[in-house]
């Protein structure tokens, strides 16, 4: 059974930092891309970042470029999302997902999803 477990969310003041983790099990980690998506109340889910385990490529939404950094640890089957200079508009539930991705920003390219972790940024 494939499982993706997110952790690291929480409440932080604007300008602060958090690191999210996505631990994967039940899949061949190196064959998947791991993406992070977020969904704020009343808004559509949006792609935040993606780490392609097959070639190490990274992708970011324009809204987080320069502030968020994604990385992968093959030994731990875990992908991290380091978030700095957080803004209130970053407040959302963050989900990680795994899939043989073609378009990293298309949620339909992902086969497996975690349960999400809440990130709240106070002003």
Image (spheres, rainbow, N blue to C red):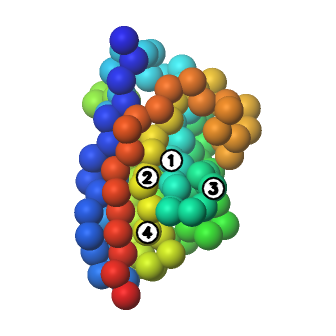
Cα separation between marks 1 and 2: 7 Å
Badge 2 crowding class, 10 Å Cα cut-off, few under 14, some 14 to 19, many 20 or more, is: many
Task: Assign a secondary structure to mark 1.
Answer: strand
Mark nearer the viewer, 4 or 1? 4
Residue carrying label 3: 44
Give residue 27's position: percent from left, percent from top.
Answer: 42, 16
Task: Find out whether the residues at labels 2 and 3 contact each other: C-beta distance under 8 Å.
Answer: no
- What whole-number distance in Å separates the C-alpha atoms at marks 2 and 3? 12 Å
Whether the residues at callouts 1 and 2 have beta carbons within 8 Å, the answer is: yes
Q: Is residue 47 above or below residue 119?
A: above
Q: Residue at x 38, y 45 (%)?
A: 116
Residue tagged 4: 91
> Residue 122 is drawn in which quadrant?
bottom left
SS assignment at label 4: loop
Residue at horizontal 60 percent and vertical 42 percent from the top:
57
Q: Which is in the foreground here, disc 4 or disc 3?
A: 3
Q: Which residue is mark 2?
A: 94
């Amino acid at each position: 059974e494939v499982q993706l477990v997110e952790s690291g969310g929480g409440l932080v003041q604007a300008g602060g930092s958090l690191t999210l983790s996505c631990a994967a099990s039940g899949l061949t980690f190196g064959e998947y891309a791991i993406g992070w998506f977020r969904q704020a109340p009343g808004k559509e889910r949006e792609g935040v970042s993606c780490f392609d385990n097959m070639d190490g490529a990274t992708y970011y939404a324009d809204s987080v470029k320069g502030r968020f950094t994604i990385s992968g640890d093959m030994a731990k089957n875990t992908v991290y999302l380091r978030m700095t200079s957080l803004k209130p508009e970053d407040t959302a539930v963050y989900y990680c997902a795994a899939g043989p991705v073609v378009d990293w920003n298309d949620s339909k390219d992902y086969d497996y999803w975690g349960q999400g972790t809440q990130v709240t940024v106070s002003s």
